[in-house]
Amino acid sequence: MKKVNFLRSIQLKFIIIYILLLIISVQVISSYVARELETELLDNFKESVNDRIDLLNYNLEQAFNKKRTDDPLEPTLQEDVQNIVTDVDSSSGSTIQVINNQGRVLGTNDYLNQDIIGKKITEDIVQRAIKFKTSQDNTFFNSKTGERIFVQVEPIHDETDNVQGAIYFEVSLEGVYGQLQKINEVFLKGSIIALVVSILLGILVARAITKPIVEMRRQAQTMARGDFSQKVKVYGTDEISQLAVTFNHLNDRLKHSMATTEKEQRKLSLVLENMTEGVIATDNKGEITLINEAAGKLFNRNPNSLISKDLLQLLGLDEKVKDIIELQESGSVIIDFSDGDEVFFVRADFSAIYDNHQALNQISGYIAVLSDVTEEEKIEQERKEFVSNVSHELRTPLTTLRSYMEALTDGAWKDPVIAPKFLEVTQNETNRMIRMVNSLLQLSRMDSKELSLSRENVDFVQYFHKVIDRFEMNVKDGKIKFIRDIPTEAYYVWIDKDRMAQVLDNIISNAIKYSPDGGKITCKVEKQIQQIIVSVQDEGIGIEYDKLDKIFDRFYRVDKARTRQLGGTGLGLAITRELVEAHYGRIWVESTEGKGTTMYFTLPLINERRRRYR
């Protein structure tokens, strides 16, 4: 790994952050101080102006309210006003005009603008002060002089509070802002000095902080090369020192984990090499990342040459399946690799690998287990053909037998003792055979993919309760007790309610048939990742371990005598398996002989987005 350039190092980032924080702090403080100082200086300035105007206003009110005679030697109002204004100190650069209530200038302290006396003033601020009898002020920028000007107009009242005139006071604000500018310059020089000192301190602090980080980086590079013998130095007890201690602990854990992983990998390699089934692992896109020797033999190719190949293309499923996730939902697929007269079938069992460290348990890859099921498929195909032939062959004689029974029932009571028994036995056997034929036909439709499912969005919890309620009502005298281990949360599945009722009827009916009086049947629903597991447990006779894999075969009976006595056909669980698989589920059984049997099946859940869409 290349050495990090200083311009890209964390040390420079610490320095920049430190300086930026300082600059921002100085800017905020200086802005606040400047604003407050400007406000304070302007308030003081306006207060001094108000004091001067109040004094001038007092003198002018005396002049306006003075009673005058016709004596020619007595000064006129204009002369008194001019004398009062002239006595005002003009060294501050202020301009004062006294205006009567008609808007005409009676006097001014501006010696260069004496011509304005006697003229009428039309400025809005003067007119508003006279009209509304209130003081008016304004600040504006003089474009000719380039100065900021403050203007205040104060009305002059008589003894009856009538406005007799107004004082127009105009003064420059440049003195105030000049003083503020000098203060800001001093503040700026101090900020620059503080910034330079802070940069030097920032460099020293950044080096002190990043030194242990640099050492940990070097140690990480050493660990990446597989060397776990070195340790990071610990300089203190602060957070970075604690990080160094944790880093050393991580080094020890990684060393142990690497040794354990290598050991497990060797075990896994031995297992994969000696498996008779083919095993293929892919990433989440379906590209092969691992394949054992047995899988290579199934395709007559070198396993290493199949790495990075697409699994769907390798299995010839790319035209039938758009996304590999569909295979994971189906669980198991039989693939026909037959070539001419040579029959070759492979069963592929798919499962997803979930990454528990990612959100929502995202799929990180898939595992496919391939088995040569050519012989099994041949037997199954022959059995399927047999079921179809038997169903068609038995339909006609069964219908004839049923018609004969109905004819006897209509009045052929020759022997009052034998005839009723004969009719009862005939009718029972006929109904049993008709049930068998219907089951055979249903299986035949499933095999030929002609069975259509009317799926809908169903809350399985409520649906399961209703099915159990129906069985509880039909069980007489409370001989069987149902126990429900079902959550209250709603689990939505996409099923055909009638077909699923047939699945549950078959499973629960078998549990009732083989349960002793007073036995318990436990119905349970569990939620797993993207699916639910439904189980029905009884306390019956149980099934031998070596017969568990056969109970879903057609015509297979665990206890043939008992099954026939109870009216079974040996096809119920075969139909159940086909229906569960048609719903993209999986069914299996666990049993202990003499203690009872538990039947399990899974159904995929509908996610929230799909449920709203449906």
Image: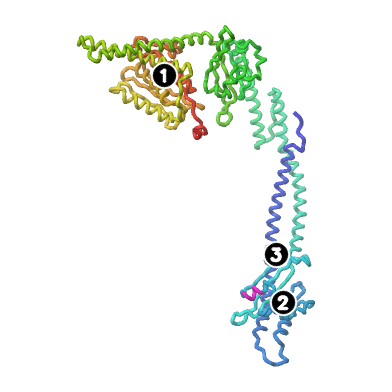
Q: Quadrant of the N terminus?
A: top right
Mark 3 secondary-structure assignment: helix
Magenta-drawn segment: 127-131
Q: Looking at this view, is 546 or 419 the one in front? A: 419
Q: Where residue 52 sits: x, y (%)?
A: 69, 74
Q: Secondary structure at mark 1?
A: strand
SS majority, magenta: helix
Say above or below: 338 vs 534. Answer: above
Q: Where residue 297 sits: x, y (%)? A: 62, 10
Say whether residue 129 is magenta.
yes
In the picture, measured across the screen, residue 409 lies left or right of residue 39, that is left
Report the residue at 44% width, 32% height from top. 489
Which residue is at the far right?
112
Q: Is residue 595 visible?
A: yes
| Count of numbered marks | 3
Q: Residue at x 72, y 88 (%)?
A: 75
Tag shown at residue 598:
1
Which residue has dot 3 on it? 41
Quadrant assignment, res 172: bottom right
Point out the tag, 2 or 3, that comes first from the N-terminus.
Answer: 3
Query: Which sits earlier in the primary sequence, circle 1 or circle 3?
Result: 3
Rounded to the nearest angstrom, the CA distance separating label 2 from label 3 is 25 Å
Q: Residues within 10 Å of mark 3 (few under 14, many from 20)?
A: some
Would you place residue 377 above or below residue 10 in this image? above
Kind of residue sitting beneath label 2: Gln
Q: Which residue is mark 2?
A: 97
Mark closer to the chain start, 1 or 2: 2
